[in-house]
Image: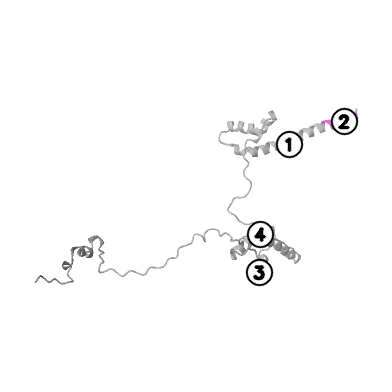
Amino acid sequence: MGEIRPTFSIDAKPRYLRGLERIPEQARIVIPATASPPAALSTVTPVSTSSQEKLQPVYAEPGTAHVQALRMVWPIVCRRLEGFPSINARQLFDELCLQFPGRFTRWQYKTLLRRVNLWRQDARARGVIIGSRTYRLGTKPRGRRPDTFKDHWEEMTDCLEDRPDQTALELLVEFQARYPGQYSLRQLSTLQRRVRAWRQQAVQRLLNEVTSNILGEAAGNRIT
């Protein structure tokens, strides 16, 4: 009889099973005896970046406006107006769209504007002092752009005095050569408006001079 090997021994199994059961040295994880059990992972709630950004109002789809939508929120609008009578109607409508997303369409702003104007008329009759109209705060810079031709406008008017028939394009090309990099063709429309206004003023000055000369001659003839 052959040798009887125990079944739990790895040598009693075929070679292909031995290779499967053996754990490679790189895959072994050595856990020290003094290692403490892993602590419970604390749940970290990620900070939503959308809350930091400016919320945008959510409007309803066109054609889904409800007549009762503004009537139901009108008490809320009245309380807001009592606290801030000079609030902009557009800002008030955006606040409603943020508070009740998907309930109002864009076209219902005009209805709210009429209701707000009527409320203000009644409030003035009751003696409520309503300040000047306020506007929404925005991140875009407001105001007029700086005058591009301010530094050299007097020089340009001198050129126009010498050559009144000079076009705005010719004037712009001339000053592009004088001051490289300061003027571009995108400013042509602005210069055309300035030249047109200057010519109107020049014609008006000539008419006033001619009229004053005629009146002066007429007065001199009367004296003689």
**Gap between marks 1 and 4, in whole Å?**
43 Å
Q: Which mark is residue 72?
A: 3
In the image, what residue type sits under mark 1?
Gln
Q: Which mark is residue 164?
A: none
- Horizontal relation, residue 196 to residue 181: left or right: right
Are dots 2 and 3 in contact, CB under 8 Å? Answer: no
**Gap between marks 2 and 4, in whole Å?**
65 Å
What residue did someone put label 1 on?
Answer: 200
Which numbered disc, 2 or 1, marks the residue that appears first in the sequence?
1
What residue did someone put label 2 on?
Answer: 218
Tag 2's secondary structure? helix
Quarter where residue 148 is shown: top right
In the image, what residue type sits under mark 2?
Ala
Residue 79 appears anywhere in the view: no
What residue did someone put label 4 on?
Answer: 107
Tag 3's secondary structure? helix
**Gap between marks 2 and 3, in whole Å?**
77 Å
Question: Residue 162: where, in percent of width, then height?
Answer: 69, 28
**Gap between marks 3 and 4, in whole Å?**
17 Å
